Image (cartoon, rainbow, N blue to C red):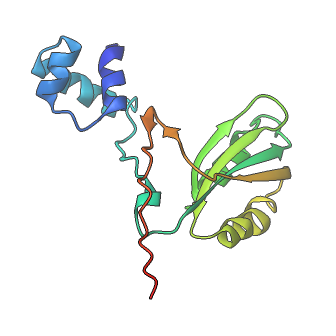
Amino acid sequence: MQTKLLRLLEEDCTHTPEQLASMADMTVEEVKAEIKRYEEEKIVLGYQAIVDWDRTERESVTALIEVKVTPQRGAGFDRVAERIYQYDEVESVYLMSGAFDLTVIISGRTLREVAEFVGQRLATIEDVTGTATHFILKKYKEKHLIFEKQEQQERELIFT
């Protein structure tokens, strides 16, 4: 498997096959064939832009939720995780080691919307025994990309 090509795709999937071939020491045909195989074998699940929503007009809140779960005989944590990731608000679900079992990342328009999701949908799922919600206040880096500082807008005060 060509892991260099996978790393290049993960870093920036907008590169052309020609650019990828040059960077991965492959031919263009090899690159196209490998990408097609990655997609068919579900190694590459999709392509996505990382957006700095703070630079837009859209209001958004992201939360990381620690979830404690009672594992199910024969299914472990999988059944509960599958139920959780069906919700549109849920961006990611991870099985964890340590003090809690699942990490759930969700986004909403407001703190209230996220809180309602946790209280009314997530916490009420059978086998969920506890949750702890942490709101993300500022993103510095995501998926190897650094969120650049926004220039402070100078305010001009005029006194009359």
Q: Residue at x 36, y 22 (%)?
A: 7
Image position, residue 50 (x, y; %): 40, 47
| 99 versus 33 height, above or below | below
- Going by the image, does 123 lie left or right of 142? right
Instruction: Using the image, determine if residue 125 lies above or below residue 28.
Output: below
Q: Using the rendered image of the protein, determine whether residue 127 is visible from the camera's viewpoint.
A: no
| Quarter of the rendering occupied by the N terminus | top left
Compared with residue 129, is residue 28 higher up or lower down, i.e. above or below?
above
Visible in this render: residue 38? yes
Percent position of residue 125, x then y: 79, 58
Give the residue furthest to the front: 160
Q: Residue at x 77, y 69 (%)?
A: 120
Q: Examine the image and state in which quarter residue 61 appears.
A: bottom right
Instruction: Please name the residue shown 80% across and 59% down the image.
Output: 123
Q: Position of residue 10 (x, y in %)?
A: 37, 30
Give percent across and percent down for residue 101.
Answer: 78, 38
The number of numbered discs placed on residues in the rendered structure image is: 0
Q: Kindly give the residue lying farthest to the bottom in the view shown.
A: 160
Q: State left or right for residue 75 relative to residue 154.
A: right
Tell me if 45 is positioned left or right of 126 in this view.
left
Quarter of the image holding residue 74?
A: top right
Query: Which quadrant of the figure contains the C terminus?
Result: bottom left
Q: Nearer the viewer, residue 7 or 82?
A: 7
Q: What residue lies at 35% left-to-right and 30% top-to-bottom? A: 11
Name the side, left or right, on which 147 lies relative to 119. Answer: left
Tell which of 52 and 102 is nearer to you. Answer: 52
